[in-house]
Structures are given as structure tokens and as C-alpha cells.
């Protein structure tokens, strides 16, 4: 079972999924307030901070002093424009340590940015189906859809990563790619190259290909619904990060190369070492 704080529950927890949360055991339905969190504001058209302003409503009498077993509805308002609102229904387990998000409005935004759309191509619909399953807490469905996406784009993604590697590591990566062509197993393809990932794609030392390999290493029939949901979230997070980072670095390199070429042409100089590939 996932462990989150209340901010993470509001920002990214799927519906109908129990999550462990540290909370004030003495809080009552009359004193409880949601923390400030980040979400998209439809009026500001940007990511903003939201807060409940201390408002939360739940079933029970005045004598209720704990949140255990209670269901609360809360309205959260954009703290920038004070007009756009978000609504949540939270159910607190009787053990006092778990919360289920039972409702959310507006629902998760299924739109994806241009870099992800470009990479997914005709497979974008499958990715969105996985996203819908994840948002609804259908772990097995989300895991199956995301796994399918990885299988369909992994070869292209690994080839693009090659363009970001320089020096002696590039030769090792190219050799690994040749071995990748000899296998049809997605997790084996990732295993062959995951340790050769450039540092620019490993923030704070975390290897996204390593996480992806681990998430794909177990068969779906061996995992529970909750475990599938956790791995589905890991797969989506890694895919979005890798695709955005790879495309962003390619675009930056291309812009730099073209800019330098134009400057050198104005000065009547040719770039040393020949034309650099974007």
C-alpha cells in the first residue's frame, strides 16, 4: 500500500484507492482543514496553489471528535484568483491511518503536452486509456496499457537517447543497442542499456530506466490490483520524464547548433569539426 501525505493524496492519488497517511488523530470533522496544494486553475490557465480555507463538511453529530470512519466533502479555492474551485470527497478508514479519495471535481486532466504527443504518435489513445484507468484506481488495466505503450515505443526511445551520449560511452551504448536488436523482450532491452544512461537523464542519481526495468520485471498475473497501480504510476512517471527530457535536450541542442551556425556564417567562419548533428 502506498504511503502519502495529504498534499500528495489531493494532487495525484487515484480514486477508490486506500493510501496510508500520517494525520492528527485528534482532528474532528469540525476542525479538519485540507492543506494547501498545487493544481491547475481553469481561470488562471496555470498551476496554482489551492486551499480549503478551513472548510470541510462531514456526516456525524457534534459529539464526533475523530475522523475515523467519516466521509468529508471539501471545497478548495484557487488562492490566486479566488474564483476557480475544486471539490473532493475523502473517506477516512476507521483505523485512523488510511484515506480513500472517493470523488474529485474537476476530474484528472487527460491532456498531454506536445513532446509526449509527438513521441506517442498513433499510440496516444492507448496512453490516455491507461491514464483513465490509473485515475479511477484500476491498477491492472493501467499497468497493461502502459506496459503496451513501452513495448511499442521503447526501440525508438532508446535510439533517440543515443544522440545525447558523447565520448567513449557512446560506443558502448551503440554496442548495447546492437544486442537490443536481438531480443524481443522489453525488460531485457532496457536491462542491456539502463546502466549506460547519461547523467543528464539521471536527476539526483535516480536512473529512470532502472525504475522502468524493475516495474516491468514481474508478470501482471503475479501482482495484486494495488501493486499493479503502483507500478503503473511508476511507468507513467518515468515515460513522461524520459520523453520530455530527451525531446527537450534535442531541441536545445538543435537551437544551439543552428544559432551558432548563423553567427559563424555572418563572420565568414565555418564551424570547427564539421556540422554537428542535432
Image (tube, helix red, strand yellow):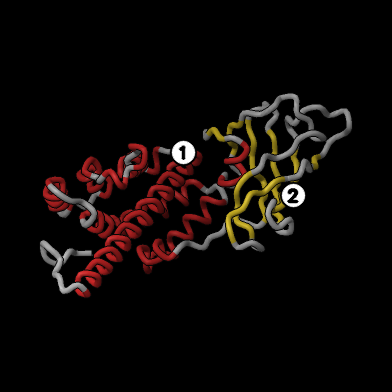
Query: Label 2's element?
Result: strand
Q: On screen, 35 above or below 86?
A: above
Number of other residues with Cα within 10 Å of mark 2, as a class: few under 14, some 14 to 19, many 20 or more:
some
Instruction: Point out residue 132 in the picture as x, y percentages from the top left corner.
Output: 53, 56
- Residue at position x 21%, y 43% from top? 196
Q: Quadrant of the C terminus?
A: bottom left
Q: CA distance from mark 2 to mark 1?
A: 31 Å
Residue 181: quarter of image: bottom left
> Given contact means CB atoms under 8 Å apart, are the residues at marks 2 and 1 in contact?
no
Q: Can I make out residue 46 in this image?
A: yes
Mark number for residue 270? Answer: none
Instruction: Point out residue 252 in the picture as x, y percentages from the top left corner.
Output: 32, 61
- Residue at position x 82%, y 35% from top? 30
Query: Label 1's element?
Result: helix
Left or right: where does residue 143 sit relative to residue 106? left
Q: Nearer the viewer, residue 170 or 57?
A: 170
Q: Nearer the viewer, residue 230 or 79?
A: 79
Q: Which residue is mark 2?
A: 75
Q: Which residue is mark 1?
A: 227
Amino acid at each position: 500500500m502506498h504511503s502519502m501525505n495529504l498534499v500528495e493524496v489531493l494532487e495525484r492519488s487515484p480514486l477508490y484507492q486506500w493510501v496510508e497517511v500520517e494525520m492528527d488523530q485528534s482532528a474532528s470533522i469540525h476542525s479538519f482543514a485540507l492543506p494547501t496544494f498545487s493544481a491547475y486553475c481553469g481561470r488562471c490557465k496555470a498551476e496554482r496553489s489551492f486551499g480549503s480555507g478551513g472548510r470541510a463538511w462531514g456526516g456525524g453529530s457534534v459529539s464526533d471528535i475523530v475522523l475515523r470512519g467519516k466521509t468529508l466533502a471539501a471545497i478548495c479555492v484557487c488562492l490566486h484568483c479566488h474564483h476557480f474551485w475544486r471539490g473532493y470527497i475523502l473517506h477516512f478508514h476507521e483505523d485512523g491511518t488510511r484515506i480513500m479519495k472517493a470523488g474529485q471535481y474537476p476530474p484528472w486532466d487527460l491532456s498531454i503536452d506536445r513532446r509526449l504527443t509527438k513521441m506517442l504518435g498513433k499510440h496516444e489513445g492507448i496512453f490516455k486509456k491507461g491514464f483513465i484507468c490509473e485515475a479511477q484506481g484500476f491498477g491492472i488495466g493501467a499497468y497493461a496499457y502502459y506496459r503496451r505503450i513501452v513495448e511499442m515505443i521503447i526501440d525508438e526511445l532508446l535510439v533517440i537517447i543515443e544522440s545525447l551520449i558523447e565520448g567513449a560511452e557512446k560506443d558502448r551504448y551503440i554496442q548495447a543497442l546492437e544486442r537490443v536488436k536481438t531480443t524481443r523482450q522489453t525488460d531485457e532491452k532496457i536491462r542491456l542499456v539502463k546502466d549506460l544512461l547519461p547523467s543528464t537523464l539521471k536527476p539526483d542519481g535516480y536512473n529512470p530506466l532502472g525504475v522502468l526495468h524493475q516495474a516491468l520485471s514481474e508478470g501482471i498475473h503475479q501482482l495484486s490490483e494495488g501493486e499493479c497501480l503502483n507500478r503503473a504510476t511508476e511507468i507513467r512517471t518515468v515515460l513522461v520524464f524520459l520523453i520530455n527530457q530527451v525531446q527537450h535536450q534535442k531541441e536545445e541542442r538543435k537551437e544551439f547548433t543552428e544559432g551558432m551556425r548563423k553567427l559563424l556564417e555572418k563572420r565568414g567562419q565555418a564551424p570547427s569539426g564539421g556540422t554537428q548533428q542535432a
